[in-house]
Amino acid sequence: MGEQVEVLAYEVIRHSPHGQYVTSVAASHFKPVMKEFAHNAIRNKELRPMPFEVYWAIAYGPLYTMVKFHLEGSPKGDKHFAFSKKLMYEALELILKALKP
């Protein structure tokens, strides 16, 4: 239940009038670290070059989707979908294949 509350709280804040400010403060710390990480990974041929939005959609889209299914049920009508480490690692394996050159 704790994770559900955290995810929902983040979504409420993100869509509030203060969402732009909160995300900009978070990004000010996160963005330089991720930029350096990505440049190093591309230089080491561990990550293919791509627009940021494509990277984000591939890297984080599956996680967001499975968390949403966990909270709201899957599109096939299964209200008891449970996000697990096993599913997370299965998705991660596919994500890494998609991101590698």
Image (cartoon, rainbow, N blue to C red):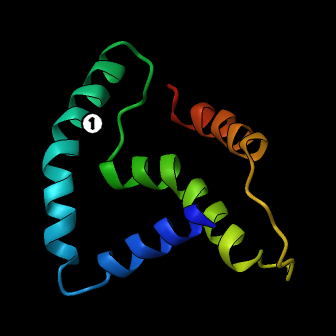
Residue 4 in which image quadrant: bottom right
Most foreground residue, 75 or 15 = 15
Most foreground residue, 1 or 81 = 1
Give the residue at x 41% y 51%: 56
Per the image, label 1 sits on a secondary structure element best described as helix
User: In the picture shown, does residue 14 fall above or below 54?
Assistant: below
Locate the N terminus by quadrant.
Answer: bottom right
Tell whether 52 sits left or right of 85.
left
- Badge 1: residue crowd in 10 Å (few <14, some 14–19, many ≥20): few
> Which residue is the extreme one toward the bottom?
17
Give the residue at x 52% y 71%: 5
What residue is shown with label 1?
34
Most foreground residue, 16 or 54 = 16
Residue 69 in which image quadrant: bottom right
Which x, y percent locates residue 9? 42, 74
Which x, y percent locates residue 91? 69, 44
Which x, y percent locates residue 93? 68, 33
